[in-house]
Amino acid sequence: MVEGLTTTIQLASLVMAGWCLVSVFRDQPMVVPHLVGMAVLWLLLIGQGVVSTVLLVGGERPPEFVVFVSYLVTVVLVPPACAVWGFMERSRWGPAVIAFACLILPVMMVRLEQLWNPASV
């Protein structure tokens, strides 16, 4: 895994969560710029997924391979699922769904790093 990409994903996710929380507190529904932000975050996560897959195919394997792959798949699927759910909810709770997802992603990225490099924890 690429640590710089992981850090970028974590920071982008936290910025997105903060932006969505501001929308929640201002009682605003989810708008197209929120979707664009989620799309950028999703592209970063897909990039991490591709890099991890290339490393796995190249022979590098974390000790808990199945757990790692399940976390990786979940991390890639969370943003589009929550974006759809948030967009369908036309109240202020739409951005709340996105904020919740964006607060979970950094934690999941830390767990992915722990699974990839268990000795460095």
Image (cartoon, helix red, strand yellow):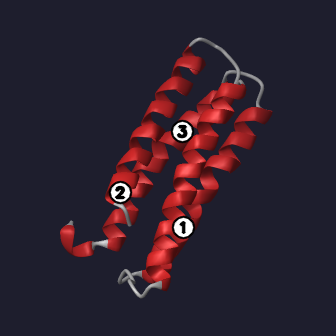
Q: Is residue 29 above or below residue 73?
A: above
Does residue 51 appear to the left or right of 86 in the view shown? left
Q: What is the three-letter code of the residue carrying label 1?
A: Val
Q: Nearer the viewer, mark 3 or mark 2?
A: 2
**Quadrant (top left, top right, bottom left, bottom right) of the N terminus:** bottom left
Residue found 59% across the figure and 11% down from its top: 26
Residue 109 placement: quadrant: bottom left
State the image coordinates of residue 57 (x, y, percent, origin top left): 50, 84
User: Which labelled disc corresponds to residue 110?
Assistant: 2
State the image coordinates of residue 11 (x, y, percent, origin top left): 39, 39
User: Which labelled disc corresponds to residue 100?
Assistant: 3
Residue 3 placement: quadrant: bottom left
Identify the residue under disc 1. 50
- Mark 2: give few (<14), some (14-19) or many (20+) Cα within 10 Å: some
**Quadrant (top left, top right, bottom left, bottom right) of the C terminus:** bottom left
Q: What is the three-letter code of the residue carrying label 2?
A: Val
Instruction: Decide which of tag 3 and tag 2 comes sooner along the chain.
Output: 3
Instruction: Decide which of tag 3 and tag 1 comes sooner along the chain.
Output: 1
Instruction: Decide which of tag 1 and tag 2 comes sooner along the chain.
Output: 1
Residue found 61% across the figure and 52% down from its top: 78
Asked whether disc 3 touches disc 1, contact meaning CB atoms under 8 Å apart, the reply is no
Question: In this view, which residue lies farthest toward the bottom?
Answer: 59
The CA distance from mark 3 to mark 1 is: 25 Å
Q: Is residue 112 above or below residue 37?
A: below
| Element class at badge 3 | helix
Residue found 60% across the figure and 30% down from its top: 96
State the image coordinates of residue 98 (x, y, percent, origin top left): 60, 36
